[in-house]
Image (tube, helix red, strand yellow):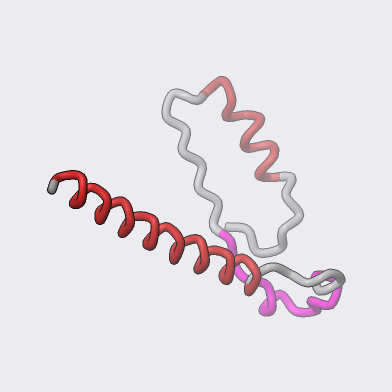
Amino acid sequence: MISTIIFVILLIDVVILTVFLFQLTLSSQRYKPKPGELGKINRLDDVPSVSLCIPARNETHALADCLTSAISSDYPKLE
């Protein structure tokens, strides 16, 4: 009886994980730029905004490199 319940729970988990991975695959394909597409963007309005959040609790040793890397990004609408 308990093994049947565990099996059903694991089966439900597998189904949920499969649906999640399928949705993730569709989303990554939908928003992935096609080759040469970035060169065709003429207006800044065509580019989505990206917010950069840097969690930095007890990370003073790595913060300078992280901020340098973030500032050197060439993405046009980085917040």
| Residue at 61% from the left image edge and 65% from the top image edge | 28
> Is residue 32 a member of the stretch shown in magenta?
no
In the displayed structure image, the side of residue 72 where residue 9 appears, left or right = left
| Residue at 66% from the left image edge and 30% from the top image edge | 65
Q: Is residue 18 above or below residue 33?
A: above
> Is residue 41 a member of the stretch shown in magenta?
yes
In the displayed structure image, the side of residue 69 where residue 53 appears, left or right = left
Magenta part of the protein: which range? 38-50
x and y, in percent, of residue 33 in the image: 74, 70
x and y, in percent, of residue 67 in the image: 62, 37
Q: Quadrant of the C terminus?
A: bottom right
Return the residue nearer the eye: 66 or 31: 31
In the displayed structure image, the side of residue 7 where residue 28 appears, left or right = right
Q: Is residue 39 above or below residue 52?
A: below
In the displayed structure image, the side of residue 14 where residue 73 appears, left or right = right
Return the residue nearer the eye: 30 or 44: 30
Return the residue nearer the eye: 12 or 3: 3
Residue 58, quarter of the rendered image:
top left
x and y, in percent, of residue 15 in the image: 38, 62
Q: Is residue 35 above or below residue 61?
A: below
| Residue at 79% from the left image edge and 76% from the top image edge | 41
Residue placed farthest to the top in the image? 61
Residue placed farthest to the front in the image? 1
Picture mark count: 0
